[in-house]
Image (cartoon, grey):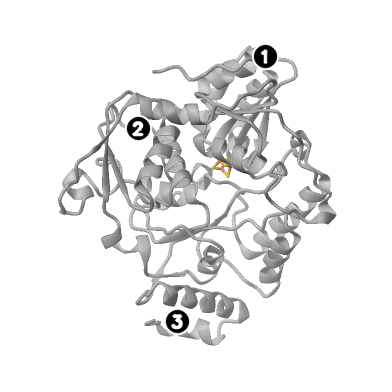
Amino acid sequence: MDLTSVERDMLAGRDGPAKQRAMKGLVQLGRAFAAPRMVEIGYAHIHAGMALYLEDVELMEELAAIDARMVVPASVNIANADTVNWRQTGAPESLVRLQRRASSAHAKMGSDCTFTCTPYWAGHWPTWNTHMTSIESTVTIFCNSVLGAKSNRDGFFAVYAGMTGRYPLFGYHLDSNRRGTMLFEIDTPVSGSSDFSCLGFLVGNQVGDGVPVISGFARRPTLDELDALGAGIATSGGATMFIVPGVTPPYGDLPAAFGGHAIPAPVRVLRAAIDAVYARYSDAHEVLDIVHLGCPHASYEEMKHYARLLDGRRIAEGLELWITASRNVRNAAAEAGIVATLENAGARVISDTCPMACHFARTVSPDPALGIVPPRLRAIVVDSAKQAKYVRDMIQCPVLLTGTEEAVETAMTGRFVARRTP
Ligand code: F3S
């Protein structure tokens, strides 16, 4: 790789052991993908240090101890425990203590301890053409497709990129890879986060690791709908970017979205295909335990929407309603009285984690010293195809996918209400 003198200094250890370690890792990554050089990044969304695994937290502490520092704005991905009111998820205190250790290490390294999968709602909003990195696929696809920033789907390398301000030039950092490979034409009303998440799920399934171009929406999708769309696409396939002409910068129309290449015949998306995603996550159940909203982590607008739906009502006895959001969004919603409205209805406003990321998962091996015993849940109702997949695969619990309004009705009545066609 062609390195600048600044990058060579880092690699040689002249800027200390932390940067040397990070640059070594990034050079290895770059060589593996035949990157000709590094690019300067403007933002990093990094690994949280998962408190389920002691070694993971210790790794973050080790980096902090050798003076690793973030040299670009850095936000931190979702945590394993509610960082505000951990008792409401039934987490053991040992898990929370470990999460706090990770938080201290991040604070020392200069990261913003957002602990969220939607750092953009917490103020991290990279602009068009900014090279960046992200460990979270939902963040990567939103930043590529809605904001026009440039990112790959990364792993721990995101931490190294944040420590050096560099990332190898390959993948979606190259304009030549940022053009459509398949065209989807929407031929049905699609409305609300749950529909967009199902649409994303079916598109992601078909496009693989290509770039879907999606057109034909009756109106401009909202930011929350675009967030749900990207999360769905990134869940069922390997896609890293989508293009909605007129929305995704800088693609104004179909010819631009395909980079001047021939526009392929469209795949028409009818209502039946979206309904099939709801049907796919519609497990048999006898008793519901939890209704969950807020995947990806809710925005302030979504919190307002939930409050409108719940105002003056009360959830059914024996059922839990979880609303998950970042601590930043929760704080803003609390100041506006929104959290009080939600809690008066019996909802639990949970910060910085989600059902999939907390101690519920049965497919992980937490540190034995934490004493975690995942609860045996009977059924979870969700309004997100992403959460639905993880509830079934990781929590190994029956799951029912429906719309946001229908999920709230379910929480009110205690009986499952399926998505109604808009
Ligand atoms: Fe975020 Fe958890 Fe959904 S990490 S995207 S709320 S599965």
Q: Amino acid at mark 2?
A: Pro
Residue 102 located left or right of residue 194 = right
**Within 8 Å of ligand 1, the CB of disc 3?**
no
Q: Mark 1 and 3 residues: CB-CB less than 8 Å, in contact?
A: no
What number of labels is visible? 3
Answer with mark 3 or mark 2, whichever residue precedes in sequence.
3
Q: Which mark is residue 314?
A: 1
**Residue 65, position as x, y percentages in the image:** 71, 72
| Vertical side of 33 occupied by 385: above or below | above
Q: Which mark is residue 221?
A: 2
Answer with mark 1 or mark 3, whichever residue precedes in sequence.
3
Residue 264 located left or right of residue 80 = left
Q: Say whether residue 308 is visible.
A: no
Cα gap from disc 1 to disc 3, whole angstroms: 60 Å
**Residue 348, position as x, y percentages in the image:** 69, 28
Instruction: Name which quarter of the figure residue 311 lies in.
Output: top right
**Residue 272, position as x, y percentages in the image:** 37, 25
Residue under the point 53% across and 18% down: 406
**Within 8 Å of ligand 1, the CB of disc 2?**
no
Q: Say whether residue 328 is visible.
A: yes
Query: Within 10 Å of the Cα at label 2, are there few (<14), some (14-19), or many (20+) other Cα atoms?
Result: some
Q: Which residue is mark 3?
A: 6
**Residue 378, position as x, y percentages in the image:** 70, 28
Of residue 197 and residue 110, the one placed in the foreground of this image is 197
